[in-house]
Amino acid sequence: MDLNDIIAKLPYGEPFLFVDELVHVDEEGIIGNYTFNENLDFYKGHFCGNPITPGVILTEVMAQIGLACFGIYLLGSDLNNGIAMALTSSEIQFLKPVYPKEKVTVFSDKIYFRFGKLKCAVTLKNEAGYEVCKGTLSGMIRREL
Amino acid sequence: MNREELIDALKPIIAPYTTNDDAFGKLSENTDFIHDLQINSANLVDIVLDIEEKFDIVIDNPDMERMLNVKAAIDIIESKLQMK
């Protein structure tokens, strides 16, 4: 499956699409990135006068690339009826702050994909190559019937 | 292992995922994972993976679809153990 085809199949849209580019995917893992536009709405209030990317948004970036994009690849290319997906658990450490205009890269490695549940070890790195988040994410993903 | 022993072996596997302590305390063959113990499908997958490890068996997709209550789980474990 072409990397751009995966993004086209995502069920997200503005203002909640947090995937810019996928750079690699295979049966064992996926790598992709996203750059935080400084005009994103949540920076107005998180925090007032001191914009820092919320941890829930960093988790969402990791989930959209590390579970949703990866899961679409693992389900296969003949997805015509859409996809049903849900995030079911997250255990993430937040190690460094991420500011507006920063580009982050998600590295997600499969722990297992069985009975519709995808569990991955996921790392988020900043442009300097430092880990800013790491942990495990799980979700259910299947073809819509 | 008889069926009672199998239930006892299952309890510590199920315990981390149940959200209904009352129903867990009264766990029997008739206990339903989803309705009685309020375990969601994502956690049911982890229970099944823990069962595979504990009993050194492989659960396939048709087994997984039947694995909705304690009775079905024990039936599946018993039949897999007999095949070994």
Image (cartoon, coloured by chain):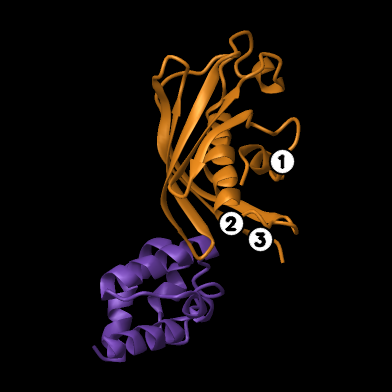
Q: Which residue is mark 2?
A: A75
User: Compared with residue A88, is residue B32 higher up or lower down, i.e. above or below?
Assistant: below
Q: Which chain is purple?
A: B
Residue A8 shows which numbered tag?
A: 1
Q: Are marks 3 and 2 on the same chain?
A: yes
Q: Amino acid at mark 2?
A: Leu
Q: Position of residue A38 (x, y in %)?
A: 66, 13
The residue at 57%/49% (across/down) is: A73
- Asked whether disc 3 touches disc 1, contact meaning CB atoms under 8 Å apart, the reply is no
Q: Secondary structure at mark 2?
A: helix
Q: What is the residue that sits farthest to the front in this orientation? A: A2
Task: Using the rendered view, name the quadrant where residue A96 is placed.
Answer: top left
Q: Which label number is shown at residue A143?
A: 3
Image coordinates of residue A43 in percent, x first then y, are 65, 17
Q: Is residue B8 above or below residue B16?
A: below
| Residue occupying the point 61% across, 47% down | A1
Is residue A103 at least partly visible in the picture? yes
